[in-house]
Each structure stands twice: as structure tokens, then as C-alpha cells.
Image (cartoon, coloured by chain):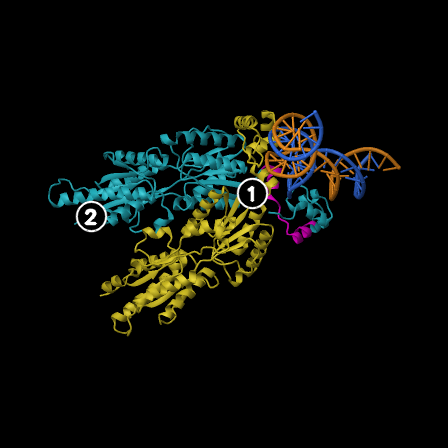
Chain colours: A yellow, B cyan, C blue, D orange
Amino acid sequence: MVASTLTEVARLAGVSPATASRVLNGSARKPGQDIAERVRKAADSLGYIPNAQAQGLAKSSSGLIGLIVHDIADPYFAAIARGVQEAAREQGRMVLLATTAGAPADEKEAVAAFAARRADSIVIAGSRSARPEDQDGNAELAAELDRYCRNGGQVAVVGHAVVGASVSEGYHVLTVPNEELAATLASELAAMRDDHFVIIGGPAGLFTSDDRVRGFQRGLAAAGLPAAEVIRTGFNRSGGFEAGVALAARIKAAHAAEDSGTSQTSRRICIFAVNDVMAIGAAAALRSEGLRIPRDATIAGFDDIETLRDFRPALSTVHLPLEEIGRQATRRAAGTADDDAAPSPVTGHVTLRRSTDLKLQASASD
Amino acid sequence: MVASTLTEVARLAGVSPATASRVLNGSARKPGQDIAERVRKAADSLGYIPNAQAQGLAKSSSGLIGLIVHDIADPYFAAIARGVQEAAREQGRMVLLATTAGAPADEKEAVAAFAARRADSIVIAGSRSARPEDQDGNAELAAELDRYCRNGGQVAVVGHAVVGASVSEGYHVLTVPNEELAATLASELAAMRDDHFVIIGGPAGLFTSDDRVRGFQRGLAAAGLPAAEVIRTGFNRSGGFEAGVALAARIKAAHAAEDSGTSQTSRRICIFAVNDVMAIGAAAALRSEGLRIPRDATIAGFDDIETLRDFRPALSTVHLPLEEIGRQATRRAAGTADDDAAPSPVTGHVTLRRSTDLKLQASASD
DNA sequence: CTGAACTGGGAAAGCGCATTCCCACTGCAT
DNA sequence: ATGCAGTGGGAATGCGCTTTCCCAGTTCAG
């Protein structure tokens, strides 16, 4: 990568590099009209492109913003990434992407890489983990983030603070009311039915998952219902699918018992998967086992990812403004958000659709 | 962003910066054991992180790879991005993301920004356009790319070469056999039916779209069928939806005519949408108009995006190894692909699913 | 008409690192 | 003992740019 330099432009224009710099790269001092024009023409004819690395070195700021996601092809992260990208463009920055599959150790590497590139700010989008096997990784990640912040970096993390991170300057947490929303979802679902609730959760220790599970249970309790059974599985589609297979077997067994009169209660199952991709996986599993939603079981997810728009049966879920979350996080980390003192919180809302429609279930069950 | 520097580390270790550099950042010369250890310990205790900008300046290479997509939240691009990310990691580089909505002018900006950052290589994933309104933008983009390549940059573009780009050193095109595959799809679809074919294409001038349309027509011709009507619309879900609404009206009219005996022919419609998201949009439109697939119309898409996995009815499409395409493009641009001379071409395959199932259509039509 | 307060341009010192020389030293053959 | 290649470390230079500092030329108040 060679290219014409500022010095060359200056020479061609017959001015000093200092002047050329001033006219080409927005300085406080504005050189005279004639000179400016001459420089600009010289730059043009040489096809001059400022070397951002050198600029960064000199100004010690890079115009880069680092984004950490589990998987960029996951609709949840893709939506957030879109928001981040948008906000970055507003700020005239570029986004550096790192995918980590949620492993704190990898996230630490990513933060270090961002720090090496002197990224102005970092947005961490993946769910935080408190699992024992992630303990060391978390500690390292926290240390790395701490160092980054001490050096003047800005960090915004979506959802929960990184485990063990000290609340230093420049560390922002974009809280997502996972628990409250899950509770609301539970009470809305519980209000009109006496279903047997089952939760498909991620591995214990994943904050996002745990919060949603806890919230859902709380909502059930508030409705006077017993706590739901929780199936722990992978925090992704295949995790949901596996759980779905298991549940399908159970449902079919119950049907059989019902038919033969063995069973006394014939309550149906309402499944809550802690995120949409898991819900989709579970729904796919039920379908592949010949079961129908909402006839044989109802199901709800969380996030309201864009994919849901064309998923059938229409999935009940909790809508989260993912793109806005990405934007907010990015703005927060840039100090652009004037409301950093009293940040406008993320709000979502329960969205009931066909997959939990009681009437359909009832009529179909006759 | 301040941080401890190599000089500080060197001083603490009691060696020269040169030596410190040699031990910390893989040089050809390896300092002695004892000294190396001392330096490493000093670096550790200071939490030293090399300044990649300075390194880049000194070595004139950045370890960055630029990725240009239309929209990172589109499953098609998200999948490619995943592949790019993966390959980048293999190369020990980071990926810089730019989204452009397909506008050549924006793409030019992105290339310039990548060039400014001295990205080692650039991957362009979006469809190329030859629309009249994009002419100027294309020219600028081509010029920018050309300059970038002349300066030693590597460019890989997926699908078609950028309009007007001169075949300079470092310019790679990852050809996707859109036309051939579309032709194959057409002949497979045509083989067993006498449907009336309709193509939902993107705006005229979008290469990807045009190629697929052309290929499909060729396939029909080869099967002895007349050319299909082409509906031009947006190259995205909503474009597909609009076209779907129009087609639904037509189908319903045909049904009505059929019922009243007005019509002599009762051929059904087989829709080919030039990409999956358009197909999904069209399918959604049909459904919202009360029509069923494949009963009232059959439909096929292109790309086999991951979303399709859980879309019902299962959509016939042409499978493209999107992730692999991203990887390949990235490797090609890195010169890692030893097969750059004779690049292993991208291959896809027709995947017929329920949405074009004749038997279902026939039985349902009785 | 003189001195002060500006104005606008250039010289030069880094920013943090890699790398080319250069030099002192060792070990070995002559 | 002398010379020579080989080894391992440091001094210095430069990557391309920003920014302070300095200086000559102006303008205006007194």
C-alpha cells in the first residue's frame, strides 16, 4: 500500500506540509482562499487520500468503533449490528467487527485487538456469562476492559455489565428489562389459561437467559401459578430444537395417555423459549414430530427478530428494538447521547400472536 | 487513548526500544533468552499493547480487511460476512464493515475510507449495477478501486466485476454461475409441468438479477417453453411482496374466470423470484391474499439463505454456499488461495422443495 | 509615525513503532 | 598472535501526519 502523501501534495502546490494539512484535513486554522484552492487542486490531481493510520497516530484517535457479537449471521446480532453501523456512520466512524461465539476469552482477545487499533469505543452485544468455565475468561476480559477504559476508551455493553468489571469512567451499560418483560409475558400468557408451562432456557449462567427465566417464573407466581419446569439447553436454534424433540415426546405420551383414559389431567403445554431462535428451533422440532402449534402446544419466544415476520405460525414474543439498541449503545459510547446521565431506557413490549392463541388451541383440540 | 509505549517497556527492561520491538513483535532477529524474558515481563507489568496504527505506519500494512455489503442484517450478506470474518481470523486480520445499500457512490466512499485506513484488501459483496442512474457512481467507484489496486491493494468482488473497472493487478472476481444455475432451475421446473411462468426480478441493470432472469428464460427456451413475463420490482422483500400482491390479484381473477367457465385454459402460475427474500415477500403476499402455496401457485427463489430453513412452505431455491463464498473471496484477496491462477469456481445446486411440488398442487387443485 | 495586536504561513518536533546500519564482542582458523 | 566471520545489542532514521512554536508582514490605535 503506497500512495501519494501530504508532503507530495504540498510540494506540488508549492506550500508547506503544515498548510496542506490545514486545508485538507479540517484544522482550526483556515488558510487563505487562493492557497486553499491550489492545495485542493494538487491533492485532486495526485489522488491524495490521507493516511488514517498516520492521522490516528498524530491525533491519537482512530475513528474506529469496535463491535463484538457472538455471530454476525444470527438475526439478533445482525439487527444490532445494523444499528451500530448506522450510528457509526452518523459519527463519521467505521466499525470493526469481531465475532466470538460468546467466549469471554475470545472477547478479551477482541478487546485487546481493538485497543491495539486504538478504537475510540467498543460495543459489546453478546449476552454476559457467569458460568464457572467462563470465570477465568471473564476476569481477563474485565481486566482488559478496565485497562482500555483507563486509557480513555469508551465501552458500551448491551444487557448486563461484564462480570467483575469495575465501574470506571467510560463504562456504559445499556440495560435491557429482560426480567420485567418476561414477567409481563408470563402474566399475559397465564391470564387466560391453565396451561402447563415449560421454559426452554439457555445454559445456567447466561445472564440474558437467566433473567428471562427468572422474570417468567415471577410472572407465573404473580398469577398464582406454580413455577415452570426449566429445560437447559444451547442458547441457539439447535438447542431449541433438541428441547423441542424432548417436549414432543412428552406431549405425544400425554396424548396417548389421554386417549386411553389413563391420565386424569389433560392440560396442554405452553412453551416459553428465552429467545426467538430457540423458539423457532423448538417449533421446528414439534412440527417434525407431527405436532401442530398452537393446537398441540403453544409457544412464545423473545426478541422479535426480523425473521419472525415470515415465520409460521406467527410467533408470540417480546419485541425488543434491536436496531435502536445498537444505535443507543453506539451513541452512548461516543458520548453523543446527551442523556448519558439519565439514559432513556430500552423499552420493549409483549407481542402476542397466533402461536399462543388460546381460541385456536381450544377449537382445534375438540 | 493513551497507553504505555514500547519505549516505556524498553526503559523498564533496561534495553533499547529496538530490542524490545524485536522480542515483542515477531522480528526476524531473536534476542537472547534472558533479555527476552526481561522485556516480556516488563511489557506484562505495564500492560503493554502495541499500537497497531504505529505498526501499520512503520510497516505500511494494517492487518485490516474491508467488507462492503448492502445491508448487514440481510441474511444473504450476513452469511457472506460470516465467511469473511472467519477467513479474516485465519489470516490474523480484522474486518472493517461498510454498508452501502448498493449505491455505487456510497461504495466509492467506502473504498476511499478503506484505502485511507490502508486496508490490505477489500471484499465487495453486493450485486453490481449497470443502471443509468448509477453510471456516474460506477465510474467513480471503478476509478477509486483502480487507484486502490495500483497502490498495491487487493480487491475481491463477488459475482460480477465492477462496471468499468480495468483489470489491474490485484483485482479478483469470484464468479457465481447465476445464469447457469437459473437455467438449470428453469429446466427442472419446466420438465414436469405446463405452468405459466412468471419471473419477479429486480430493477433492470442489477447484474445478479439480470443474469438469473436471463438464465431462467434460457432454461425455459431449452424446454421448448415461451419466455416468461418479467415483473421488475425492488431487489428485496418488499419488492417481492408488491409483486406478490399483483400476482395474487391475477390469480384470483383467473380462478373466478375458471369458475364461471369464461376461461379456456386453466394453467397455474409458477413464480421464480430472483432471490430468496423476494420469494419470501411474494409468498407472504399470496398468503395475505388468501392464496396457498403450492396449491394456488408454485414459487421458487435463489440463494438458499439460512432463513429458509424454517420458512413454510419449504421454498424451492438454488443453493449457494454463501459462507464459503465469503471465505473464498477473502482468501483470494489475501493471495492465500493458491488456486488464484485456476480458482476453484463457486458451485451451487438446485434444491426443489415443497413450494414447487407438483403433486401437492395437483391433488390440492381437484 | 511608532508600537501593539493580529494574520497567515513555515519550520520542526513529535505520535509509536520497525528497521537499517553500525559497533563491540566472541569464537575460531590461520 | 592476527584476522575474520558471526552474534547480539543499540543509535538513528523514517513511516505520514498534526500541532506547537516562531516569524514576517499587516493593520490599527494612540
Q: Read off the chain for label 2.
A: B
Where does the magenta region start and end?
A: B39-60
Residue picked out by circle 1? A62
From the top left corner, tell me how far across and down residue B127 is, in percent: 39, 37
Residue picked out by circle 2? B362
Q: Read off the chain for label 1.
A: A
From the top left corner, tell me how far across and down residue D25 is, in percent: 65, 25
Q: Amino acid at mark 1?
A: Ser
Most common secondary structure along the magenta stretch:
helix
Which residue is depicted at the point 37% across and 46% down?
B305
Q: Which mark is residue B26?
A: none
Left/right of residue A15 with respect to residue B186 in the rendered view: right
In terms of secondary structure, where does tag 1 sit? loop
In terms of secondary structure, where does tag 2 sit? helix
Q: Residues within 10 Å of mark 1 (few under 14, many from 20)?
A: many
From the top left corner, tell me how far across and down residue A281 is, in percent: 37, 57
Q: Is residue B50 magenta?
A: yes
Residue at the outermost left position: B261
From the top left corner, tell me how far across and down residue B198 is, in percent: 25, 39
Q: Are marks 2 and 1 on the same chain?
A: no
